[in-house]
Image (spheres, rainbow, N blue to C red):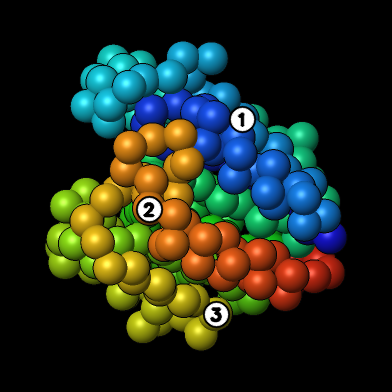
Amino acid sequence: MTDVVLFHHVQGLTEGVASFAERLRGAGHTVTTPDLFDGRTFATIEDGMAHAREVGFGVLLDRGVAAAQDVTSPGVVYAGFSMGAMPAQQLAQTRPEAGGALLLHACLPVSEFGASWPAGVPVQVHGMADDPFFAEEDGDLGAARALVASTADAELFLYPGEQHLFADSSLPSYVPEAADLLLERVLRFLGQVAGPATGR
């Protein structure tokens, strides 16, 4: 099956992120979940953001990239919830072994990490249509639409609602129906990713 490196969101490596990883493992995938917050979790996005700013987003990005150094199997998929999409996207765009990317609740402009999305590396972006953290056209949603427009292997999935971390079952923002559909699409994606990544 597929090796996956799954990065947590700004509230930390919560029980919901761990549960999501377990569901991927239950489907036969190998999942690594780096903890960029050294065991700390936060009750709200605002508290988590305050901690992330204190540490520095650049530092957290470097931690994420470093945490993935030992996962070198061809076709590895990099995945991230919200803040975790930053290292996932950088790794997918820059690592030759990358086999795919799953950007959950966030998407950065491709230009942040390179001139274009690498050929042969499929990517899915998932977010809620009215999520104030995601849905701004000049923010994540705009970046996601630009990615889909410029990349044959890119898909954008919008779900009805306004919750940000709707796929984390341990948070009040959890939306079961949307989370189940997201998981179904993610598992289908992972099932389709096979073999070594193509060259850059």
Question: CA–CA distance between discs 3 and 1?
Answer: 26 Å
**Residue type at numbered disc 1:** Pro
Question: For the point 54% across and 38% down, which residue is it?
Answer: 17
Q: Answer with mark 3 or mark 2, whichever residue precedes in sequence.
A: 3
What residue is rendered at 38% in x and 53% in y?
175
> How busy is the neighbourhood of tag 2: few (under 14 within 10 Å), some, or many (20 plus)?
some
- The dot on residue 191 is none
The structure residue drawn at horizontal position 66% and vertical position 72%, both measured from the top left corner, is 188
User: Which three-letter amino acid code belongs to the residue tagged 3?
Assistant: Asp
Closer to the eye: label 3 or 2:
2
> In the image, which disc is placed on residue 34?
1
Q: Tell me where residue 180 appears, x and y as whole percent.
A: 52, 61
Q: Secondary structure at mark 2?
A: loop
Are discs 3 and 1 less than 8 Å apart at CB? Answer: no
Examine the rendered structure and indicate whether residue 118 appears above or below residue 106: below
Q: Amino acid at mark 2?
A: Val
Near-viewer residue (60 or 83): 83
Q: Position of residue 107 (x, y in %)?
A: 36, 57
From the viewer's perspective, is 189 left or right of 146?
A: right
- N-terminal of the pair, mark 3 or mark 1, is 1
Residue that badge 3 annotates: 153
Quick one: SS at disc 3?
loop
